[in-house]
Image: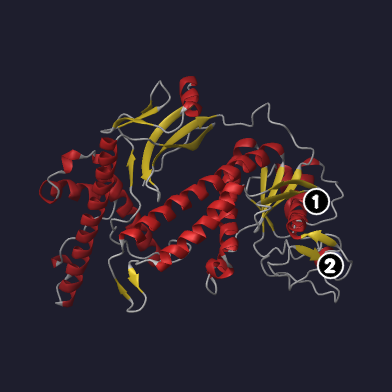
């Protein structure tokens, strides 16, 4: 598949706006999303039928030439077959934009490609299963890539093919200003419905010369580590290698309130007549009250996610604009899957993992925009288990221990702050490497990987990484190359 090339000096960026569609537009959006699902399921059934037919014919001893011809799995091939069949299998197809059917077929083509490349080992990561039929509960979305997609001059409407001008919940001025100035271009629009039933429009755009704003303040601390907390009092702790706590961002009250409301709602749903009967282990028709609770759970989830995203966006923008090197933990994906996964380690930890994943995504593109270096700690880096004073490890630290008490030197420090300090120390060689190679950084950059491209002088990072790491050698003199994830 030919990939779209982003011109030099331009950046791809999505702008997402909540929509306030009219009831007629809601019906049209639902119809488009349903059409996408229909095209996906119809063609998936056909793909399966052809595969089964060929397998059966082979078992009868037919030669390869006599078999039913293969059905192409690429998007153009699927689209061609769909267009031949749509008049009889979906005579209503004219009611929706052709982009709706294209959305479903594109998803199917990607799913089939992922499955086949995963099966023959061309794809990294976990094995991918064969595409499944989309149920009515599947997320509803449509992507428009052709036709009239524009932001209206009143900055409160987005025009989409077939749907016309859809009112946005908030002003579109941030994108509108760029478009008027000629520094942004809309490529496509994806309209999606979230678990709370709200429709969103994400506009994929090309933005020119995204840079750090001139008025953005610079922190006096160029290198910082960021620890993502488990507890409500510190969602994020930012600290320097020298032990200065630069910022401590608490989870907003509305987030903890939404989370306790969620727990209460989930307990209520468990008492109600749900879709699954635990006594007989069979599916059943859920009650109206259960459905009402489920809808509230969906809305509360969406609200909590929005609150958290808002805090994280503000924090990551500040981090990427104010500091030169930012060090974050990497998520221990293997640890999350092992032995029951995240839910076994509690809701708090699961939320912290989700926050960490979001922060890394945000920081990785914001650090590119604003020219900051993002350093990712090795996923086995024991950030919260290492003493910030003497460097000795405390392996039996549990998540409940909020304070780190060193058995060797008597260091007494807040756990999250200690973790942030240890992370910041990983970033020090990166900073020295670009500023003054003769810097006397006492701490090696073990376990750090560069996310953003370092400056040419940043070769020093590689050298630093291979130096002996005295502060991680314990009493008996045995270096422990890999500890448990903190
Ligand atoms: Zn110590």
Q: Earlier in the sequence, mark 2 or mark 1?
A: 1
Using the image, tell me which numbered label, if any, was put on residue 241.
1
Q: Is residue 399 left or right of residue 289?
A: right
Say which element carries label 2. Answer: loop
Q: Residue at x 18, y 39 (%)?
A: 95
Hey, which quadrant is residue 466 in on the image? bottom right
Work out how far the residue at label 2 is from the one at label 1, CA to CA, in angstroms.
Answer: 18 Å
Say which element carries label 1. Answer: loop
- Quadrant in which the C terminus appears: bottom right
* Mark 1 residue crowding within 10 angstroms, few (<14) / some (14–19) / many (20+): many
Q: Residue at x 74, y 34 (%)?
A: 218
Q: Eyeballing the image, is 99 above or below 153?
A: below
Closer-to-camera residue (362/170): 170
Q: Which residue is mark 2?
A: 406
Q: Eyeballing the image, is 211 above or below 26?
A: above
Residue 404 placed where, x, y %?
79, 64
Q: Is residue 26 left or right of residue 205?
A: left
Q: Ligand 1: does it lie within 8 Å of the C-beta at label 2?
A: yes
Closer-to-camera residue (262/125): 262
Does residue 484 appear in the picture of this structure? yes
């Amino acid at each position: 598949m030919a990939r779209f090339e982003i011109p030099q000096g331009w950046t791809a960026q999505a702008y997402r706006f909540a929509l306030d569609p009219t009831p007629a537009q809601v019906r049209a959006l639902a119809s488009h999303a349903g059409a996408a699902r229909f095209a996906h399921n119809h063609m998936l059934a056909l793909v399966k039928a052809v595969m089964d037919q060929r397998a059966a014919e082979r078992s009868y001893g037919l030669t390869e030439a006599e078999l039913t011809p293969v059905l192409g799995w690429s998007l153009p091939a699927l689209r061609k077959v769909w267009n031949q069949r749509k008049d009889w299998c979906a005579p209503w197809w004219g009611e929706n934009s052709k982009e709706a059917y294209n959305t479903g077929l594109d998803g199917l083509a990607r799913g089939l490609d992922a499955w086949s490349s995963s099966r023959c080992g061309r794809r990294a990561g976990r094995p991918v299963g064969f595409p499944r039929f989309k149920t009515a509960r599947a997320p509803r979305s449509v992507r428009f890539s052709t036709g009239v997609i524009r932001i209206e001059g009143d900055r409160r409407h987005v025009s989409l093919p077939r749907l016309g001008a859809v009112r946005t919940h908030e002003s579109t001025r941030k994108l509108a200003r760029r478009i008027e100035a000629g520094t942004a271009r809309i490529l496509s629009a994806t309209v999606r419905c979230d678990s709370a039933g709200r429709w969103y429009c994400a506009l994929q755009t090309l933005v020119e010369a995204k840079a750090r704003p001139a008025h953005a303040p610079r922190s006096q601390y160029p290198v910082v580590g960021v620890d993502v907390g488990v507890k409500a009092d510190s969602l994020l702790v930012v600290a320097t290698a020298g032990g200065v706590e630069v910022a401590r961002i608490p989870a907003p009250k509305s987030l903890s309130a939404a989370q306790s409301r969620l727990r209460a709602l989930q307990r209520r749903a468990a008492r109600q007549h749900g879709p699954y009967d635990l006594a007989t282990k069979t599916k059943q028709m859920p009650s109206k009250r259960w459905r009402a609770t489920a809808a509230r759970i969906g809305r509360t989830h969406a609200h909590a996610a929005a609150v958290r995203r808002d805090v994280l966006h503000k924090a990551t923008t500040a981090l990427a604009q104010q500091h030169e090197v930012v060090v974050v933990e990497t998520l221990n994906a293997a640890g999350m899957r092992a032995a029951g996964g995240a839910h076994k380690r509690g809701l708090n930890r699961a939320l912290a993992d989700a926050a960490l994943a979001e922060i890394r995504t945000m920081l990785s593109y914001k650090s590119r925009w604003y020219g900051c270096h993002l350093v990712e700690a090795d996923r086995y880096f024991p950030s919260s288990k290492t003493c910030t004073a003497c460097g000795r490890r405390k392996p039996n630290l549990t998540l409940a221990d909020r304070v780190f008490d060193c058995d060797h030197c008597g260091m007494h420090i807040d756990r999250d702050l200690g973790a942030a300090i240890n992370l910041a120390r990983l970033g020090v060689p990166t900073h020295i490497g670009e500023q003054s190679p003769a810097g006397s950084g006492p701490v090696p950059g073990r376990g750090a990987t560069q996310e953003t491209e370092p400056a040419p002088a940043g070769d020093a990072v590689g050298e630093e990484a291979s130096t002996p790491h005295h502060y991680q050698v314990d009493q008996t003199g045995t270096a422990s190359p890999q500890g448990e994830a903190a």
